[in-house]
């Protein structure tokens, strides 16, 4: 089983920065991708940024240029650095990972519990 533990959320003023972290723990053979999603009240959960094996990254248009996703494969950790935050970035941010736990199993998707990010003055 795979567990994802997020940290780094909180209250920040508009224009400020935050760095979210997500550490994967458990037994796994291959972490194919790690990503961040967010969900605002009354809205669907949407992709913020994804980092796949081979250092391929992609970002949602709303955060392009303001966010950087990075992975520390030795620590099984993904980070999301967000700058120039806006009130509309307020949401619960969820860590997501696609993991192959053994060479003989198909990859599966795992989610963290989420961390609240509030951008407000």
Image: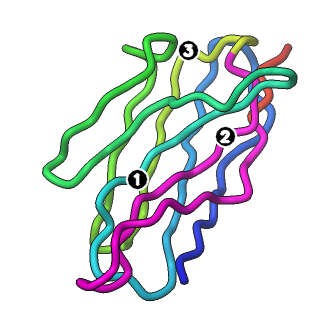
Which quarter of the figure is the N terminus placed in?
bottom right
Q: Whole-Å distance between the Cαs marked 1 and 2?
A: 13 Å
In this picture, is 67 found above or below 9? above
Q: Are marks 3 and 1 in contact (CB under 8 Å)?
A: no
Rendering coords of residue 34 (x, y %): 40, 53
Rendering coords of residue 95 (x, y %): 57, 51
Secondary element under disc 3, as helix, strand or loop, is: loop
| Residues in magenta, as a range | 89-116
Secondary element under disc 2, as helix, strand or loop, is: strand
Q: Whole-Å distance between the Cαs marked 3 and 2?
A: 17 Å
Which residue is under mark 2?
93
- Residue placed most toward the observer, 118 or 60: 60
**Where on the picture, by quarter, is residue 69?**
top left
What number is the disc on residue 84? 3
Which residue is under mark 1?
34
What number is the disc on residue 53? none
Residue at point 20%, 40% (across, down)? 56
Q: Residues within 10 Å of mark 1 (few under 14, many from 20)?
A: many
Q: Residues within 10 Å of mark 3 (few under 14, many from 20)?
A: some
Give the mark nearer the N terminus: 3 vs 2: 3
């Amino acid at each position: 089983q795979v567990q994802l533990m997020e940290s780094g959320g909180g209250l920040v003023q508009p224009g400020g920065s935050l760095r979210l972290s997500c550490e994967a723990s458990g037994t796994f053979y291959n972490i194919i991708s790690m990503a961040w999603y967010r969900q605002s009240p009354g809205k669907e959960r949407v992709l913020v940024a994804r980092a796949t094996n081979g250092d391929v990254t992609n970002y949602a248009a709303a955060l392009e240029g303001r966010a950087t996703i990075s992975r520390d494969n030795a620590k099984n950790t993904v980070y999301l650095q967000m700058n120039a935050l806006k009130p509309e970035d307020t949401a619960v941010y969820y860590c997501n990972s696609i993991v192959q736990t053994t060479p003989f199993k198909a990859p599966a998707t795992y989610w963290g519990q989420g961390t609240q990010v509030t951008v407000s003055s």
